[in-house]
């Protein structure tokens, strides 16, 4: 096989599959050679419950969050949650932390999305201390913790990966985290982004995959996905930094004016083809391989099974093909 990575992940939970139905899926994934399952946290399941089930039901799988927001849990609760996952899956859990977005943090969780860089940095530093078993009693820039110590010490603190888009957060990941989590970038962008970290370490990337030969259908779905994400300020800024501003400016202008249809129509085909993996199974596998060649060490597929059976897609896109 052309991939050089020894880890290969997939996003859980699957859409339209209940959490209880995932028990057989976890075994199937491990049988197919998937090493990792990674959760997310937006408007579906929380980041930890699916991983807790995977920890109990399938000991062959590595587990990770990509990501848990730095704002929506208080520091002590975050430490307790991470410590509990580490205890449930010793040596198999990676905690992915990120700033998230104003919609998730402020509009949906009623928490001010203030100073996301320093809040994420402070949560990372606090967790380092708390998970080591130290008593934490100090002022951070964005919060204060007084007299907290985990009552159930973590024997083997999990690695902490940081979700990062632009140089400031990428450099923080390189300086203080154990790995970096990437999202919504092309295979050609990977080296540009990783160069900013200043080091060689694990790079997780969530890759959106639409396995269908119907190019028009894939691009139509891809345009909707791109519009939903890349009109968020943090992602717009990311793609301007990557040099995609001229290609996406018409979409941003139409979106801001309220013309959603035009916003979709003006997204160029080559942008869709760069950011959304689509085509036959072999074409999708080749495209995934380009991310690995660029420096991604843990590709994490997010399969959109439009025009394809989920069982078949998971098998055909797995690491053993």
Image: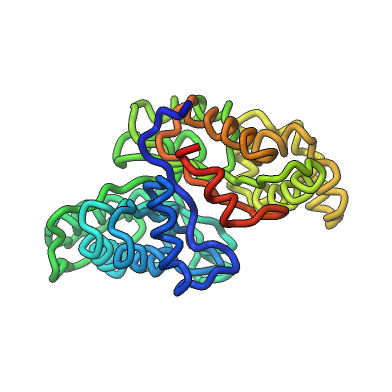
In the rendering, at what x and y percent does residue 86 appear? 24, 59
Asked if residue 144 shows in the view, the reply is no
Q: Nearer the viewer, residue 21 or 63?
A: 21
Q: Which residue appears at 42% of the width and 59% of the height?
A: 68
Left-right relation of 189 to 54:
right
Q: Which residue appears at 82% of the width and 40% of the height?
A: 250
In the rendering, at what x and y percent does residue 278 appear? 68, 40
Q: Which residue appears at 39% of the width and 32% of the height?
A: 5
On screen, 281 above or below 158? above
Asked if residue 255 shows in the view, the reply is yes
Q: Quadrant of residue 15?
A: bottom right
Left-right relation of 47 to 157:
right
Q: Which residue appears at 54% of the width and 50% of the height?
A: 314
In the rendering, at what x and y percent does residue 298 appear? 41, 39
On screen, 243 above or below 23? above
Q: Nearer the viewer, residue 233 or 189?
A: 189
Q: Nearer the viewer, residue 219 or 35?
A: 35
In the rendering, at what x and y percent does residue 153 appear? 13, 63
Q: How is the image coloured?
A: rainbow
Q: How many marks?
A: 0
Left-right relation of 101 to 281:
left
């Amino acid at each position: 096989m052309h991939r050089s990575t020894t880890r290969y992940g997939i996003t859980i939970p699957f859409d339209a599959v209940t959490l209880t139905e995932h028990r057989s899926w976890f075994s199937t994934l491990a049988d197919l050679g998937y090493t990792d399952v990674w959760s997310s946290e937006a408007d579906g399941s929380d980041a930890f419950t699916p991983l807790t089930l995977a920890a109990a039901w399938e000991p062959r799988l590595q587990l990770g969050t990509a990501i848990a927001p730095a704002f929506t849990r208080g520091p002590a609760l975050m430490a307790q949650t991470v410590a509990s996952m580490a205890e449930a899956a010793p040596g198999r859990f990676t905690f992915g932390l990120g700033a998230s977005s104003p919609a998730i943090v402020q509009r949906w969780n009623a928490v001010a999305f203030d100073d996301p860089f320093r809040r994420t940095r402070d949560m990372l530093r606090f967790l380092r201390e708390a998970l080591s078993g130290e008593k934490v009693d100090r002022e951070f820039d964005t919060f204060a913790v007084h007299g907290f110590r985990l009552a159930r010490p973590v024997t083997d603190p999990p690695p902490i990966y940081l979700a990062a888009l632009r140089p400031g957060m990428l450099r923080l990941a390189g300086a203080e985290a154990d790995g970096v989590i990437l999202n919504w970038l092309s295979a050609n962008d990977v080296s540009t982004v990783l160069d900013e970290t200043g080091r060689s370490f694990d790079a997780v990337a969530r890759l959106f995959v639409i396995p269908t030969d119907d190019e028009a259908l894939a691009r139509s779905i891809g345009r909707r996905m791109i519009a939903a994400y890349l009109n968020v300020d943090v992602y717009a800024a990311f793609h301007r930094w990557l040099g995609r501003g001229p290609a996406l400016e018409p979409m941003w202008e139409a979106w801001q004016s309220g013309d959603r249809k035009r916003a979709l129509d003006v997204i160029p085909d080559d942008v869709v083809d760069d950011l959304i993996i689509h085509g036959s199974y072999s074409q999708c596998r080749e495209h995934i391989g380009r991310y690995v060649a660029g420096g991604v060490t843990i590709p994490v597929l997010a399969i959109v099974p439009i025009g394809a059976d989920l069982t078949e897609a998971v098998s055909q896109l797995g690491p053993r093909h």
